[in-house]
Amino acid sequence: MYRSVFTLRVSCKIAEVRHLDITCENWQNYGGLGADRVRYYCLVNERSTGIQDMVARKFLVSGLVQGVGYRYFTQRAAARHQVRGYVRNLADGRVEALAQGDERAVALFGQELAAGPDYSKVDKIEETVEEPDNSFSSFRIER
């Protein structure tokens, strides 16, 4: 069996960690560690070492925010900031979004929600602190 050791230096997006070294004993077992897998290992190592403190915020957005692509805009913003959770329309015309992630990412996500997409008009955004959990593995649009 071919056996070798590789150490990869990965840039992380957290201020306290500039680089994270990942050591792989057998390159073939890790499928070549493409860019997606490297990012995954980086996130796993940050979470397991407690470097990344998770926060959760619920946003209630009022204004012209339904029928203008606001939920899709929110999902793209979540992907940019690497937050997990959901977004959904409410019966009263508002949009509700729950975001979980590191504090800076959630704050930047909230700023984007306040700006909104073209053709929307955000009148008010309410932010409440929630207890974070690991129930979301991605960000989804709920109907």
Image (cartoon, rainbow, N blue to C red):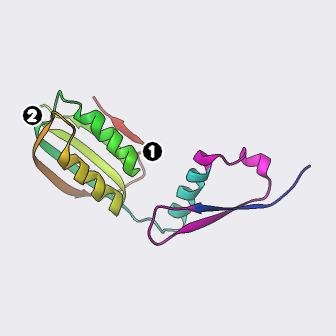
Q: Quadrant of residue 45?
A: bottom right
Dot 2: element: loop
Q: Which mark is residue 15?
A: none
Residue drawn at point x = 52 percent, y = 63 percent: 46
The segment highlighted magenta reads: 11-37
Residue drawn at point x = 37 percent, y = 51 percent: 81
Q: Which mark is residue 137?
A: 1
Above or below 79: residue 71: above
**Residue 79 x %, y %:** 39, 44
**Magenta stretch: includes residue 47:** no
Q: Would residue 83 be seen by someone viewing this image from the given angle?
A: no
Q: Amino acid at mark 2?
A: Asp
- Judged left or right of residue 63, residue 13 is right
Q: Nearer the viewer, residue 1 or 6?
A: 6
Marks 1 and 2, the one that precedes in the sequence: 2
Residue drawn at point x = 48 percent, y = 69 percent: 51
Report, in whole angstroms, how far the alpha carbon at label 1 lies from the one at label 2.
Answer: 28 Å
From the image, tell me which residue sits under label 2: 92
